[in-house]
Image (cartoon, rainbow, N blue to C red):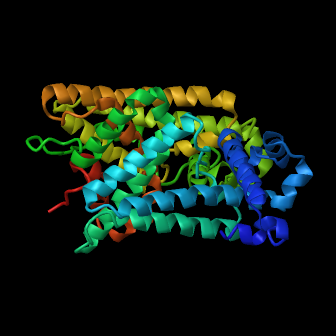
Amino acid sequence: MTHSEAREGVGSPAADTPRFEQKRQAIVHAASALINENGVKGMTFGEVAQRVGLNTTSVTYYFRRKEDLIVAAYDATLDLLREMALVAAAQPDPRARVRHWLAGHVELRAMIRRGEHPRTIALSEIRALADEAQKPLLSHYRTTLEVIAGFFAAPARPRSRALSIARAHILLEAVFWLPAWSVQYSLDEFGRLTERLFEVFAEGLATDEAGWPSVPLPQRETWRSEEAEQPGTERAFLRAATVLINQRGMRGASVTRIAAELDLTKGSFYHHHEAKDDLVLACFDHSHDRVAAALNAAETLPETYAVRLASVLAELVDVQLFDATPLLRTTALQAIPAELRLDVVARSDRLARRFAGVLIDGIAQGSIRAIDPLIASQVIMSTLNSAFEMRPWNRRFTEPQAAVETYLWTLAHGLFSEPD
């Protein structure tokens, strides 16, 4: 029994029957699908009941409160992630473990598409839950992270330990990102997709000859932020909203909290923005503009495509780890209205294609390893997107550059090598 079940009304004799458990699972799966579609706030008992053929009162027989159902939905996906990690960890060596982990998640996507497995839930809004619900779920997540970190050899020194955590985090984020882009592939291509995805992680992007040197980019002020933004300015709003959404999800980044971060009233917030969704879309635009600006700056360098790409990634990971205004995580998409997501997703796809273009040119030039550029570009996007979560991790480094290099080591050189 999970911690969420302990709070439910499962003590009756009916709770021990297969029929009860079957219906309970159907409710959890319906809630997971609704949270993916509409966010936590948009999931209601009424809609769940409609999807499983019950009335609203009947749903409360299984879950007394909406939050109990939300936690049960997250628990179901976290249980699955941990189970898949443990099965992969039982494989004989690191390569076999990573291959099994990636293949298992690609097959899961195929099963979901064929209707053979219920949809898993995106974990983006866990941090928006109340502390009593959030803490056990985050502990559950960290347990899985540790299992994945154990895919690799036992760390011999502190930086090896840091690298193992970064590897595990990047592998988790890669499978979280998979639903967003695997839909572009037919099921017939999924075998090849698995092999090419594993190849990116196993070998990395750098060739043995060219290495992975980065250089400072010009015009850094176009994507870096000031330590202190002027109160009441649009940049100040963008910073406060981006940080809060990254930390607490859309639901946790309320208008009240955003205004409080800026020492403003809710009335002042609405003086500047008609609705929170408008500010969130502005945050996405700001983040996309900054990524595009870094790519534009790299194009002016008289360097190989490998150096250009390494320099862009180093700059953007540094932004995610250290800049006062990070890039907005795409997990915020889950909670904005569906009709507003299309433009954001389209622009994100365009940035992925730009990275793919740099990879294609570098492969033709011989400065970047010959890997599948479309798949590698999605790994780049998930790696950049997730780097903000590593801010507590980077405190173990005395130099910011060491944190950036360690985090990007896997992308550049593969999962199975270590820095000297």
Residue 7: x and y in percent read 77, 70
Residue 68: x and y in percent read 76, 62
Q: Is residue 378 above or below residue 120?
A: above
Task: Residue at 35% x, 52% y: name it.
Answer: 100
Q: Between residues 18 and 330, which one lies in front from this camera angle? A: 18
Which of the image's four quarters has the C terminus? bottom left
Task: Residue at 58% x, 48% y: name it.
Answer: 122
* Farthest-out residue, left: 209
Q: Is residue 177 above or below residue 123?
A: above
Q: Is residue 196 above or below residue 170?
A: above
Q: Is residue 323 visible?
A: no
* Residue 59 appears left or right of 189: right
Q: Is residue 314 visible?
A: yes
Q: Between residues 420 and 137, which one lies in front from this camera angle? A: 137
* Residue 171 appears left or right of 339: left
Which of the image's four quarters has the N terminus? bottom right
Task: Residue at 62% x, 69% y: name it.
Answer: 135
Task: Residue at 67% x, 38% y: name it.
Answer: 37
Residue 27: x and y in percent read 75, 50
